[in-house]
Amino acid sequence: MNRSPSLSAKREASPNPSALRRWVLAFCVIRFDLERGQTVEECYPPDSLSPDQQLLVAFSSFPDSMSHHHPRHRSSIHDSIFSFRFPAAGAGSFIYGYVFNRQRQDARLPRGGEQKSVVVLSHYPYSSVFRPLLQILGPLCFDIGRAALDLVASHVAAWPSPSPGSPMDLPIGSSALRVHLPPSPDDLAATPFTPANPFVPHGLFHDADLFAAFRGLLLHLWTLWELMLLGEPILVVAPNPPQCSEAVAALVSLVAPLLCSADFRPYFTIHDPDFARLNSLREGDSFPPMVLGVTNLFFLKSLKNIPHVISVGSPSPNSTRVLPVVSRSSSAGTGRNTRPGKLNLEQLSLNKFSPSSLLTAMKLRREGPLCLMTEHKEAVWSTYSATTKPDTAILNRLLDAGTSARIEESMSVVNNEILRRHFLELTTNFLAPFGPYLRATAPSEGSSPFVEPPSLPPFHADEFLNGLAARGPGKFLTKRMRSNWLDLYRDWKIAVDRKKADRTTGGVIIRLKVFLADYEWIHYVTIHNCEKEFWNTICIS
């Protein structure tokens, strides 16, 4: 896509609000005022957000503070893009926010700088659309002001309605956004158990940079996959909003084609209305199934009940971490490559022993996540014991860009496709034992309407687990899971029983309902066509 399409600054006709709402709920421009705090300068269309929603959007659209990690020159500009999510008025619905934030440091300004954010709000998790749209709208807003909102809104309102699961060309100026939308959350039946093309999005946030987000924690990806599969609560800590929101999006995408069973918040702040509820949990209370991306280290103290903490990212966004060393508790790098090649698995080994790594692991385990208060480290704190083993064959295929930043992006694209293909295959093989419950022979449209359609086999969890224990999980999972592989299915069943993963069941329960609806519809259509043919015959004769 052309990142700088030619956009005419002339006044466009006011866009149709209903047409605009097919994609976008609102555009906002928010300024951080030294006296008044976050101030909403523009909200288009007007009255599209309630005062409470405007306040929440304003607090979610800025880093917790002007980052001290950015270089301080006399005059410098730092742009970043990140996302957040919060509940909408309707039960079970959410609003997604996509932010273009500009921090300008200038010694001549009060307190040495200013910052402003341009925000796109939508009911849809279409990051593949709104992130590139913000790369156009954000700088344009700083160039021509409010007119940029009217101009871009008129283009968006002219787009056709979203077509989930399909590729689309969305005109914007002289260019077009070429995107492939994820499937609709309510249309899981469209996703096969074994997707034919792994490069087509089969879940949310297929465009998230999985490799870059967890580059220092690659060997933990299989543990994180299980935690996401089970809908476990996870706290993701990162130095800045772009890194934490990208990591949360990458976690959500790990379990494709399933939906994430937990409530995920790519960038969570203390101003979120849910914070008071979470902060009031007492010691020993179960933490709700949520994946929270945070940058404020205060959460390490206030959310002590959350059982799994992940620290990701680098405090210096421009640093190139080439060859990380990963241990159960830490991922501090100790080596660098000078030219592109394969990642060195010897340095990624979980079992590699050295006195310094042992002392570091013991220190991190003793201090826990609170050690991040003094120094940021990439690490995982969790007592969960994973069933799935890291796949060294997959890790061996990953490419290392060496110290060359020029080819870093292309290497990341290749590595992302390798990892996505693997975890898509891993998830579909995990779901494969449920296949017989969804593959009953449906009546064809040409079958007799006077014969009852074949019934679906009943699903009983205990019988399913006993049968699965007898026949095994299949060759693919057998090679990649430990001998206690059945525990993962049992844990998933427990999570479902506790309604921790009722949306994950995931796919399976929802897909059963969709399948049954289609099943009955085909039978109805068959009867209807037969009756129509009968009456046509009577009329002709």
Image (spheres, rainbow, N blue to C red):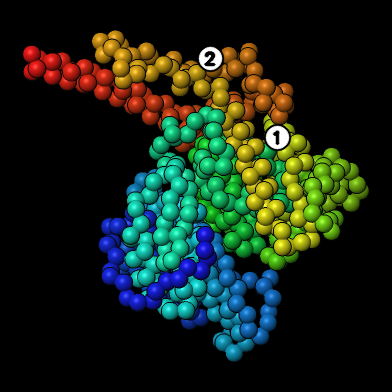
Q: Is residue 431 left or right of residue 509?
A: right
Query: For the point 52% across and 37% down, which residue is it?
Result: 257
**Location of residue 194 (image quadrant):** top right
Q: Is residue 531 visible?
A: yes
Residue 26 vs residue 156, the one in the foreground? 156
Q: Residues within 10 Å of mark 1 (few under 14, many from 20)?
A: few
Tag 1 and tag 2, C-beta contact below 8 Å: no
Q: Residues within 10 Å of mark 2 (few under 14, many from 20)?
A: few
Looking at this view, name the residue that lies furthest to the front.
540
Q: Is 55 situated above or below 9?
A: above
Looking at this view, name the residue that lies furthest to the bottom.
108
Residue 311 vs residue 435, the one in the foreground? 435
Q: Which residue is mark 1?
A: 385
Amino acid type assigned to the residue bearing label 1 in the image: Ser
Q: Quadrant of the C terminus?
A: top left
Percent x, y for residue 445?
31, 20
Query: For the point 13% across and 19% down, which residue is it?
Result: 536
Q: Which residue is mark 2?
A: 463
Please, what secondary structure does the residue beneath circle 1 have? loop
Percent x, y for residue 106?
61, 84
Looking at this view, name the residue that lies furthest to the top.
451
Percent x, y for residue 475?
67, 22
Q: Is 361 situated above or below 118?
A: above
Q: Is 242 situated above or below 416?
A: below
Decide which of tag 1 and tag 2 comes sooner along the chain: 1
Percent x, y for residue 240?
62, 63
Q: How far is the residue under mark 1 from the one under mark 2? A: 26 Å
Amino acid type assigned to the residue bearing label 2 in the image: Glu
Query: For the point 76% across and 52% down, which residue is it?
Result: 400
Query: For the point 59% across and 42% down, which residue is it?
Result: 254
